[in-house]
Amino acid sequence: MTSLAEPVIGHWDFPRSVAGVALLVRFGAEHGLDAGTLLADSGISPAALSDPVAEVAAAQELRVVRTLAELMPDAGPALGGRYHVTTFGILGYAFISSPTVLDAVNVALRYLDLSFTFSIPRASLADDRVLIELDDSALPTPVARFLVERDLAAIHTVIGELLPGGVPLLAVDFAFPEPSDVTGHERVFGQLPRFGRPTTVAAYDSAFLYRPLPQADPHTVAACEAQCRELVARRRARAGIAHEVRELLSRPGAIGVGMDHVARELAVSTRTLRRRLAESGTSFQELLDEVREVLAQELLTTLAVEDVALRLGYAEASSFIHAFKRWKGVTPAAYARRA
């Protein structure tokens, strides 16, 4: 009996490899957009893009996506075509070493939070078809269409790379009106999609689910999945307690509270909070700096440097200036002028 896995996550807010942002920046550069423009206000430095182990929050990548979508609103399908099996690192190698297409699809759904998707995919069987439907209900409206087009194009590109000659796409529907230019859609999908449909879904012949993959290897896929489990466990742990601390520190007026106060809010001892953050690969001070950096960028657009320092809990403006130069490489005043 054919069994298709459920997606392991139901929302796009999960930590990601910086490789996804690097791909966005490379794509933008090919179309005349500089890295500084795309990374503005994301909290991601150009140097971080070349770090193979660096991670970013989903909200940071989403800021880059927003900028790219504003400047290139019809580029979703073309961008999606740049996501290849190898783009996904160890998860991609788990795809190509799986026994069949079905196994590769299930691996993708089990470790979806190692991908770069913002639209949550669900796979199902209907008669002789495999349907891959994208849920865009949680996406911010200004970038929903752009991300759905990108994500479905990326899924189709990766599936097509699993077998020699690709996997034929029977039909593709989008749940939004037909855009004025559909050449990008036809180029990536090999056909004109149907627009204005009830859901966004791609349909494939279910017979291809059982086709053996040419690079299948049981030992390799087992090793890849083991690494995927280890990586995703670390990311989920960091997203857990670290995410809660970030949320608390981001509340109005909370940036100046200490670790003891945050521990009480989370109903744990200060010692336990310190230990759990260390197990997640971070610390209270690192998280406090992350929140301060994001808030500083927002506040500097409307407030003087001294006022921002006060809002962020610094006793002296000089301490804030020193910290900001460490984060951004420029003084707060220079950043504010540039912004």
Image (cartoon, rainbow, N blue to C red):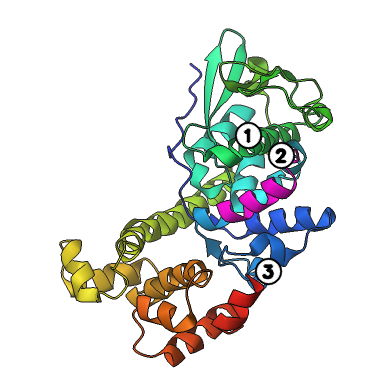
SS assignment at label 3: helix
| Mark before the other along the chain sequence, 3 or 2 | 3
Task: Please provide the residue range marked out in magenta.
Answer: 62-76
Residue 312 in sight from this viewpoint:
no
* Helix, strand or loop for disc 2: helix
Quadrant in which the C terminus appears: bottom right
Label 1 SS = helix
Give the amino acid at mark 1.
Arg
Which numbered marker is on residue 145?
1
Residue 86 % position (x, y): 70, 49
Q: Is residue 54 left or right of residue 184?
A: left
Taking the spot 48% from the left edge, 82% from the top edge, the residue there is 305
**CA separation in Å, label 1 and label 2:** 8 Å
Question: Principal SS element in the magenta part?
Answer: helix
* Residue wearing tag 2: 76
Structural distance between the alpha carbons of marks 3 and 2: 24 Å
Please tell me in which quadrant of the rendered image residue 292 appears: bottom left
Q: Which mark is residue 300?
A: none
Tag in front: 1 or 3: 1
Does label 1 or label 3 sit earlier along the sequence?
A: 3
**Coordinates of residue 224 in the picture (x, y in percent):** 56, 50
Residue 50 image label: 3
Q: Amino acid at mark 2?
A: Gly
Residue 67 covered by magenta stretch: yes
Quadrant housing residue 291: bottom left
